[in-house]
Amino acid sequence: MSLLTNLAENSLDEGYAEAAARRVEEQRGPWRPGWLLALGLLGVGLLLATSAAQVRERAPAAAVARAALTKEVQRRTAATDRLEADLDRLRASVAKARQDALALTASGSQLATQIDQLEGATGAAPVVGPGVVVHLEDAPTDQAPGADVNPRTSDTTPQGRVTDRDLQTIVNELWAAGAEAIAVNGERLTTLSAIRSAGEAVLVDFRPISPPYDVIAIGDARRVQSAFAEGFGGSYLQVLKGYGISYSIETKKSVRLPASGGITVRYATVPGKTEVRP
């Protein structure tokens, strides 16, 4: 009877009881999983706080560097503008001397006329005539769509900003509508011109231009405007309007486009002689 009573009162073996007690003590110890998690979160918090402090410390230095770069860009842009003005004066002087020399003979006068036509067509000389002006402005900040993937550029540029691809499309449609000469914000386009982007800046022949954008095309103003508005160019402007970009199209009786600063003579030939390369 005493054996049966002992089994009823103490059903758990003493070894199992000791193991269970040790397990309970271990769980109550100082290195429980909860403490480990707390220490890990504390370490992550300290790391984030340190990173934030470093960013705040570097912000003034970054602002100073950005201001210095902006000032340098403005200085070099002004220097380039002065050089282009000097180039225009020298071109005018050379053109006058050439006209005076060619005007001495009848064949020279015909050659001078031909040269003037070719220079106007290639962008080597300024041109004046009736034209069409397509004016584009970025969407206001409070109306511009977000910076999600822009379907016009396949990247994350703000959708309410005029991009290099937008200007490329407008220029190509003006050429197709019959334009004879085109300039974007005063930068004359030639067959070798490129409209590209560098970060958020738009470049025309590696010259940065800023909004708003004026795309000026010389030609039969009414015909160019009609063909452009009724073609893909007009439809594309409607698409840009959906992104908050404003535009206008107007004709002018007379506009002047400057000569391109990027024209370089690659080779030349003299009748009856071999080709001459610089």
Image (tube, helix red, strand yellow):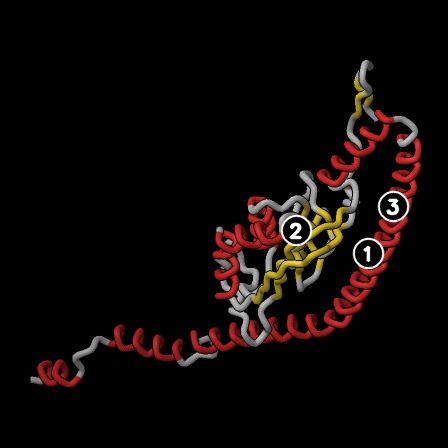
Q: Secondary structure at mark 3?
A: helix
Task: Tell me the residue at 77%/32% (across/down).
Answer: 114
Secondary-structure class at tag 2: strand
Instruction: Identify the image quadrant of the N terminus.
Output: bottom left
Residue 217: which disc? 2
Q: Residue at x 57, y 54 (%)?
A: 225
46 relative position to 105: left or right: left
Residue type for callout 1: Thr
Rendered image: mark on residue 87: 3
Distance between the alpha carbons at the discs numbered 1 and 3: 15 Å
- Locate residue 269: give its quadrant: top right
Q: Secondary structure under badge 1?
A: helix
Q: Position of residue 218 (x, y in %)?
A: 67, 49
Residue flagged by tag 2: what amino acid is it?
A: Ala
* Label 3 neighbour load within 10 Å: few <14, some 14-19, many 20+: some
In the rendered view, does 235 fall on the left or right side of 196? left
Q: CA distance from mark 2 to mark 1?
A: 25 Å
Q: Are marks 1 and 3 in contact (CB under 8 Å)?
A: no
Q: Is residue 28 left or right of residue 171?
A: left
Q: Which residue is mark 1?
A: 77
Choose mark 1 or mark 3, whichever is in front: 3
Nearest to viewer (mark 2 / mark 1):
2
The x and y percentages for residue 155 are 53, 56
In this view, the residue in front, 185 or 204, is 185
